[in-house]
Amino acid sequence: MSDAYIALADGRVLEARARAPGRTRGELVFTTAYTGYEESLTDPSYAEQILTFSYPLIGNYGVRTERFESESVQPRAAIARELTDDVADWLAGEGVPAVDHVDTREIVTTVREEGAMACGIAAGPDATPEDAVDEMEACKPMSDHVDIGAQVSVAEPTVHEGGGDVDVALLDCGAKGSIISSLTDRGADVHVLPYDATPEDVAAVEPDVLFVSNGPGDPENFVAAQNVVDEFAGELPLAGICLGQQVITSALGGSTEKMAFGHRGVNQPVKDLRTDKVVMTTQNHGYTVDDTGPLEVTQVNVNDDTVEGLDSEELDVITRQYHPEANPGPHDSLGFFDEVLDLASSSRRVAAD
Ligand SMILES: NC(=O)CC[C@H](N)C(=O)O
């Protein structure tokens, strides 16, 4: 007999095996990444989502905190074909429900066909299908999580010293740790500011560049970050990753839209339109830039032509929809951080004059 149930918004209830008990709800998404489960499970951009792994075995090389992208597990639950004890014990210890022994191929094809959807999970000895359905029915659309930034951002400003000359103000909308370390490794001092920092808070750290991080949920809900970008556009170089690209674009007059099921994986091909070169990238997003406003499209996704990179020489802006910090994932695009720091030291501004 099953001891776990997954209720989908299309009315189906799937039976599974409980690996970490509990009841929860969230937006059902999937990643095709075959490694990097520790990084994915600690990526704050997965807040309020239920993460399905399409790769059938998750946990085969253990669980090490060095690979975490934040201090806690971020999705509300995990689903896999088979979870090892290492991962199941970790999730149980964190109070995050986990289930396996389910046909994840069916879940993935359902999400591909019907889009990311509300989902409820009930796992453990007393779980019933009705519990999972109750959870699913209480699941809010992602855009209704208007203050999701508060769940994932630092409460107080913190500084990470890289020992160099460049000061980066990083608006932490749910930043992955390796975005910060990619900057400090290159000598930048990173001033991490809460997602709702004011323009005064940003000015107080005297930054050379304003960097908007990745983060969960609907970018249109990050109103404070958009205000900060609006305030400094044209005054300070701007850089962003994922939600950061979306927030910067919206603040400059463009717009974003929700995708059917998004991009989550470590083999998304991205073409640079200036060099015609294609690189493999790590991705995790459910929204995309629709109208780019004053920004020029420099990179596109080879699979579906969505916007992957934006640039403005005039406004000193450089953004990426994918994750150049590459944790997990191929390291093809790490050079983005060098470009950001070059921008900060004004070399591009001089060159553009
Ligand atoms: N990784 C991210 O920053 C994700 C951005 C946004 N929450 C999206 O899903 O599109």
Image (cartoon, rainbow, N blue to C red):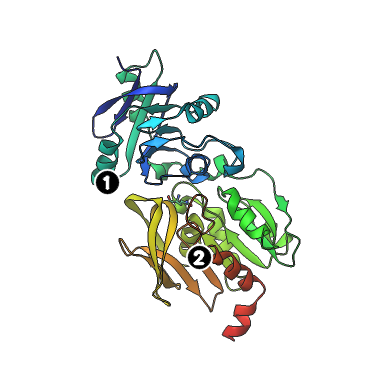
**Mark 2 = which residue?**
319
Residue density around tag 2, few if under 14, some if 14–19, many if 20 or more, within 10 Å = many
Could you tell me how many numbered marks the image carries? Answer: 2
Q: Which numbered disc, 1 or 2, marks the residue that appears first in the sequence?
A: 1
For the point 39% across and 35% down, the residue is 57
**Residue 326, numbered label:** none
Residue behind label 2 places its C-beta within 8 angstroms of ligand 1: no
Whether pointer 1 and pointer 2 mark residues with C-beta atoms closer than 8 Å, the reply is no
Task: Pinpoint residue 324: horizontal percent, then vertical percent.
Answer: 51, 59
Q: Quadrant of the N terminus?
A: top left
Q: Give how far across and how far down residue 301 sits, in percent.
A: 36, 63
* Residue indicated by mark 1: 112
Residue drawn 54% across the image and 35% down it: 63
Judged from the image, the secondary structure of the residue bearing numbered disc 1 is: helix
352 displayed left or right of 46 = right
Q: Hey, which quadrant is residue 15 in on the image? A: top left
The location of residue 50, given as percent across then percent down, is 40, 36
Residue 323 drawn above or below residue 277: above
Residue at (61, 42) in percent of width and height = 66
Q: The disc labelled 2 sits on which kind of residue?
A: Thr
The three-letter amino acid code for the residue at tag 1 is Arg
**Who is closer to the viewer here, 254 or 174?**
174
Q: Residue at x 71, y 66 (%)?
A: 166
In the image, 211 versus 228, the foreground residue is 211
Q: Position of residue 340 (x, y in %)?
A: 59, 68
Secondary structure under tag 2 reads strand
